[in-house]
Image (spheres, grey):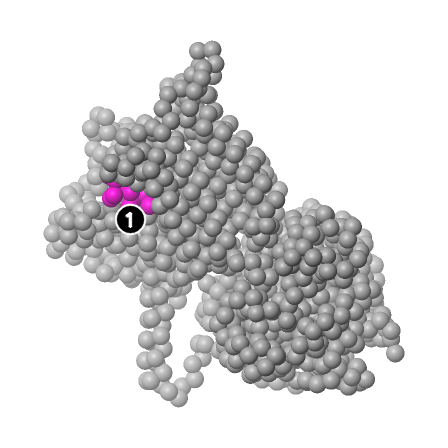
């Protein structure tokens, strides 16, 4: 069976070697299989390539795309047309051209996806598929009236040789997908599926990320369509119907085709199921009934073949490893990172640098910030100045407007009133992405760390090329995070928050907004985390705004404090002054009469 | 056995245990206030009682009926009402309609409205248009209209001015005095403890204090330590 | 032109009825039901089979419609049982799989060729000048209006409507207050299944009625529902009727037939781009 590794490469050589091995297997199969199976095999490969594309857009980026075969039809149409006008280059050149044309169509259809989420996009793509289906029925493919067959490459005549050609194309496409998935684009797709806000706060455009997913997916479909036209010679619309697109979409979900080997398995199922039904004399329409039923099963249980097989494999290898080396510590799966308690720095050393905020030296300056949601005033007329290199705590009871404040600073509430300036430059009107690129980074109260990524890929994505591999490792070590190769899915939530902070520090921000970063850590971890935070301004030149409930932590980390209640600043200034303010305790505990 | 009993209850979420081995008893007509720092597992505990999350360990029973794997609907039919965090009115429904959802009869709606006479003139308004305080009044009246045996209240004060919250507190006490067992989670500890019969402190998913409310009120340091993680005050 | 527009009104009525069903589903049970028309198609085909068993036409149709409602309820039950907390995307994806399943199943049961449907409502109703308006057109437009008004009244005036709205706004809270979420959402599925099956059964004899063409009436219908933002019933009705008339008018010009295919898609895209032109940040994500 063809198999390609879909885990991030340790080096580029391994996937290349696997690809070469797959081509060799393909060559062997093309020589020994009966000719009927060779033809079926080519059909399966066309489906595999389309499934690879769906794996990107549906599996990785989490968008519902129901028109994959319409993109394939675009590729097939362009190849047929180039053939009918006798364009130079032959199929080997036409194929990528067909893919590019399909990618262009994908970007155009994906344009509405800039603003659309989930199910609206499904409506758009279904509309596109239905219209393309009817249109193809009307205009037909070039060459079908005149009977001009699409010419196969000279090197690969005959069905057996053409199968080998298809295997090579599949291997190339798999390599492309593999490297794309490991690249920034690939991280972006997984990110956008998990959290659009997280993507934008990492300084990455949500729009571009979605479009690249759509474009790459359509490109692969176009290649598949072009390959099909070389296989059958004369192309008919019946190969690209809407219902087949739906079936392919469902199959992509069932198989988990964001994994390359599962796309291959899906393609095999695509031809195997109808073929088996035919052998047993059962109507082939049952094939789609089966896919539909499997789809419902897979969607309702939230599982897919790929994930299930992977989990089974992992359990087996884990079990074997355990029985083999009982004593050796499994370093790969750290559950709770324990800090080697470094010499406890007196907290006061940090506050020496903290001078009272002066207007001139303010890195961030906020004036009259107000935010309303309908009838509710979340923030009203808030003024805030953060001195360069300071650590300021933002406190207040639940619902006081702390997270709203961070949202407004990070650009998620463009409707706010008042001005926000970073080092004298106004941020009003700038999107979260632009603000992130200017050097304002934030972490989230809820978990926004996509479990589908590895620690290293996550940090590199957040850092946007600002940090070398060495620095990434340094930062991870500084915060006691697991090594870059660890899968985030195997890291507990508290540690994920630390990784989030480390990753955002790797981006070398000027201002880092931390929204309850220590939630989910134990008290001891709190303490060590506080010691790490204190060092950040001096070591990395980053200014911090910290939302935190734990007063111990606030005391040891912050030099200035701002206390919010009902969206208004009730106290601000130097830490000890603010904590001594009786109003603060009142707000915090609801103690109306202070004894 | 007219009691709501939790015996050694643990709740796990994706990241691990959030409630570990909590046991407590709510008697009809008594008011328990549950305090503790953010992330202590207070909300998860309430959610496990009403069936929003399932327990990983331990038993619960309501008036002798084991709650086990009962659905939320079945638990509510046993007389358990859970008032969640946030202002959980149904915004497009009028005040009247919100109350009709739970009231057994038109008279039940009127009785519930008597808790808050100020709601009378807003009967026909969409509840989404009311102020935050009024919305919480609707939520409380709606819970009362259901004639619960046991009432779980989560952070009633969220985003409310203490003055408004003070208007709600006596009503909660009044509901308890009418024979309802109440378990209330509250961040405004001092205010909430005043009306409580018993106090429970939860930190890190564990019960760290359970008993009369007076000692906590008398010694703020005790409360501060548990609540804010302050070593010395 | 006018003849064409009026001829398209019957289809427009169907779009409107389906759009109302889609809107109700999206609002009340958080599903964009891609299999909405396929359920109706399945029912209409069953009615043909029943009629071949010498059942009177009305009885055969009624039996088909009932089976359609049951099928719809079954899908609803699956979603309510296993995806009670899932987002609208995941829930709708199930309906994509059931669309695939229903269409393929009807190929097996009924064949892929169009069936000869006996029309329930033969002949013209009246004519305006030289333009003939068929009975089907009158009934469909009336049905669209009745369904929309009826659903509106049910939602705003009845006790069950109050519960449904509560459920759509805060499903968890409603359940905690004892509103039977599962039962009610299955009831919504059965109800919309019933309505769409009836509508498709009435219109099917006048349309290209192979299983696929019928099922993909979901595309113009969802375009109409989108015009109402999957929230407003009145706009869904207006959108459905207008879309039907527009397509009917375009059908008069042979050279425009390709454009006619693209009308629903273009309307969807233009409308969505207009309404969502401002970047908004999803609260949850």
Across and down, in percent, residue A586 comes to 82, 71
Residue drawn at x 83%, y 62% as measured from the top left: A358
Q: Quadrant of residue C200?
A: top left
Q: In front here: A298 or B166?
A: B166
| Residue C183 appears in the figure | yes
Q: Residue at x 57, y 69 (%)?
A: B78
Q: Which residue is mark 1?
A: A288
Marked residue chain, label 1: A
- Residue drawn at x 39%, y 31% is C203
Crowding near the residue tagged with mark 1, few <14, some 14–19, many ≥20 C-alpha atoms within 10 Å: many
Magenta-span inclusion, residue A251: no
Please, is residue A131 above or below residue A385 in the view? above
Q: Nearer the viewer, residue C222 or A568?
A: C222
Q: Quadrant of the C terminus of chain B?
A: bottom right
Q: Is residue A436 visible?
A: no
- Residue that appears at 30% across and 34% down: C56
* Percent coordinates x, y for residue C92 in the rendering: 45, 50
The quarter of the picture where residue A71 lies is top left
Q: Secondary structure at mark 1?
A: helix
Camera-side residue of A192 and A390: A192
Q: Main secondary structure of the magenta part?
A: helix
User: Is residue A1 positioned above or below A159 on the image?
Assistant: below
Magenta span of residues:
C102-112
Q: Nearer the viewer, residue A244 or C207?
A: C207
Residue A516: x and y in percent read 66, 68
Number of numbered labels in the structure image:
1
Query: Residue C231 location, x and y as percent?
Result: 57, 42
A479 displayed left or right of A401:
left
Which quarter of the figure is the N terminus of chain B placed in?
A: bottom right
């Amino acid at each position: 069976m063809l198999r390609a590794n879909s885990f991030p490469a340790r080096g580029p050589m391994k996937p290349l070697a696997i690809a070469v091995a797959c081509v060799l297997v393909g060559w062997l199969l093309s020589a020994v299989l009966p000719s009927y199976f060779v033809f079926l095999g080519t059909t399966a490969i066309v489906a595999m390539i389309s499934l690879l594309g769906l794996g990107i857009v549906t599996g990785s980026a989490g968008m519902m795309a129901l028109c994959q075969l319409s993109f394939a039809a675009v590729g097939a149409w362009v190849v047929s047309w180039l053939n009918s006008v006798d364009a130079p280059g032959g199929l080997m050149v036409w194929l990528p051209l067909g893919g590019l044309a399909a990618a262009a169509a994908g970007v155009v259809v994906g344009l509405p996806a800039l603003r659309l989420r989930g199910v609206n996009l499904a409506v758009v793509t279904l509309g596109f598929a239905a219209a393309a289906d009817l249109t193809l029925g009307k205009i037909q493919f070039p060459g079908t009236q005149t009977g001009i067959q699409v010419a196969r490459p000279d090197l690969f005549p005959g069905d057996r040789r053409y199968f080998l050609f298809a295997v090579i194309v599949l291997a190339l496409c798999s390599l492309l997908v593999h490297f794309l998935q490991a690249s920034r684009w690939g991280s972006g797709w997984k990110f956008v599926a998990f959290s659009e806000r997280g993507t934008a706060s990492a300084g990455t455009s949500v729009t571009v990320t979605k479009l690249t997913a759509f474009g790459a997916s359509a490109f692969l479909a176009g290649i598949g369509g072009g390959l099909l036209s070389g296989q059958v010679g004369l192309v008919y619309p019946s190969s690209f119907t809407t219902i087949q697109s739906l079936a392919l979409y469902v199959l992509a979900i069932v198989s988990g085709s964001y994994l390359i080997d599962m796309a291959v398995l899906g393609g095999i199922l695509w031809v195997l199921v109808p073929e088996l039904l035919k052998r047993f004399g059962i109507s082939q329409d049952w094939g789609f009934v089966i896919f539909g039923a499997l789809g419902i099963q897979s969607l309702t249980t939230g599982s897919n073949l790929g994930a299930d097989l992977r989990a089974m494999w992992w359990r087996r290898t884990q079990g074997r490893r355990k029985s083999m080396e009982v004593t050796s510590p499994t370093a790969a799966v750290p559950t709770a990172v324990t800090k080697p308690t470094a010499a406890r720095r007196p907290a006061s050393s940090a506050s020496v640098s903290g001078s009272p905020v002066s207007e001139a030296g303010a890195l961030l300056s906020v004036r009259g910030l107000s935010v309303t949601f309908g009838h509710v005033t979340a923030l009203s007329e808030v003024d805030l100045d953060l001195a360069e290199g300071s650590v300021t705590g933002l406190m207040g009871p639940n619902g006081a407007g702390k997270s709203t404040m961070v949202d407004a600073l990070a650009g998620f509430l463009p409707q706010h009133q008042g001005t926000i300036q970073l080092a004298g430059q106004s941020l009003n009107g700038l999107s979260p992405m632009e603000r992130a690129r200017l050097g304002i980074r934030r972490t989230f109260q809820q978990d926004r760390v996509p479990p589908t990524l590895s620690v290293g890929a996550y940090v590199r994505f957040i850092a946007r090329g600002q940090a070398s591999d060495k620095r990434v490792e340094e930062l991870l070590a500084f915060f006691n995070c697991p090594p870059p190769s660890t899968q985030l899915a195997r890291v507990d939530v508290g540690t994920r928050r630390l990784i989030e902070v480390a990753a955002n520090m790797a981006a070398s921000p000027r201002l880092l907004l931390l929204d309850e970063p220590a939630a989910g850590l134990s008290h001891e971890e709190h303490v060590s985390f506080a010691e790490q935070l204190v060092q950040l301004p001096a070591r990395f030149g980053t200014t911090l705004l910290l939302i935190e409930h734990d007063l111990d932590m606030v005391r040891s980390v912050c030099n200035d404090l701002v206390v919010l209640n009902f969206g208004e600043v009730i106290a601000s200034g130097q830490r000890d002054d603010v904590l001594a303010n009786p109003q603060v305790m009142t707000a915090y505990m609801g103690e109306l009469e202070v004894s | 056995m007219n009691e709501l009993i939790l015996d050694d209850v643990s709740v796990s979420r994706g990241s691990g245990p959030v409630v570990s081995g909590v046991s407590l008893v709510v008697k009809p007509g008594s008011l328990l206030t549950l305090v503790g720092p953010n992330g202590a597992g207070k909300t998860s505990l309430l959610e496990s009682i009403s069936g929003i999350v399932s327990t990983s360990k331990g038993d619960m029973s309501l008036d002798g009926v084991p709650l086990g794997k009962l659905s939320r609907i079945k638990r509510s039919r046993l007389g358990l009402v859970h008032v969640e965090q946030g202002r959980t009115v149904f915004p497009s429904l009028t005040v009247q309609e919100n109350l009709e959802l739970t009231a057994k009869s038109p008279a039940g709606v009127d009785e519930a409205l008597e808790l808050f006479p100020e709601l009378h003139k807003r009967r026909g308004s969409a509840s989404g248009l009311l102020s935050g305080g009024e919305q919480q009044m609707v939520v409380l009246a709606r819970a009362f209209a259901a004639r619960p045996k046991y009432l779980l209240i989560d952070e009633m004060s969220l985003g409310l001015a203490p003055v408004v919250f003070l208007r709600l507190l006596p009503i909660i006490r009044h509901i308890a005095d009418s024979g309802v067992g109440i378990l209330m989670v509250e961040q405004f500890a001092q205010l909430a403890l005043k009306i409580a019969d018993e106090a429970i402190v939860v930190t890190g998913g564990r019960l760290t204090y359970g008993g009369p409310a007076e000692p906590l009120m008398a010694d703020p340091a005790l409360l501060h330590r548990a609540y804010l993680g302050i070593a010395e005050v | 032109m006018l003849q064409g527009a009026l001829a398209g009104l019957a289809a427009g009525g169907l779009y409107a009825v389906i759009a109302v069903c889609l809107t109700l589903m999206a609002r009340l049970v958080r599903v964009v039901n891609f299999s909405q028309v396929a359920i109706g198609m399945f029912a209409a085909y069953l009615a043909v089979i029943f009629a071949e068993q010498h059942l009177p036409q009305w009885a055969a149709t009624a039996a088909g419609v009932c089976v359609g409602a049951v099928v719809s309820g079954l899908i609803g039950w699956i979603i309510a049982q296993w995806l009670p907390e899932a987002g609208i995307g995941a829930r709708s994806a199930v309906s994509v799989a059931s669309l695939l399943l229903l269409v393929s199943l009807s190929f097996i049961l009924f064949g892929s060729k169009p069936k000869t449907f006996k029309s329930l409502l033969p002949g013209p109703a009246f004519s305006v000048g030289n333009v003939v308006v068929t009975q089907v057109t009158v009934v469909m437009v009336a049905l669209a209006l009745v369904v929309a008004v009826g659903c509106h009244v049910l939602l705003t005036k009845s006790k069950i409507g109050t519960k449904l709205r509560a459920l759509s706004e805060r499903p968890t809270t409603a359940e905690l207050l004892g509103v039977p979420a599962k039962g009610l959402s299955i009831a919504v599925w059965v109800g919309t299944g019933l309505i769409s099956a009836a509508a498709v059964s009435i219109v099917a004899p006048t349309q290209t009625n192979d299983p696929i063409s019928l099922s993909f009436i979901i595309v113009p219908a969802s375009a109409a529902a989108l015009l109402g933002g999957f929230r407003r019933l009145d706009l869904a009705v207006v959108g459905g009727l207008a879309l039907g008339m527009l397509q009917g008018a375009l059908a008069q010009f042979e050279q425009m037939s390709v454009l006619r295919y693209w009308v629903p898609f273009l309307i969807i895209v233009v409308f969505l781009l207009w309404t969502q032109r401002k970047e908004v940040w999803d609260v949850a994500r």
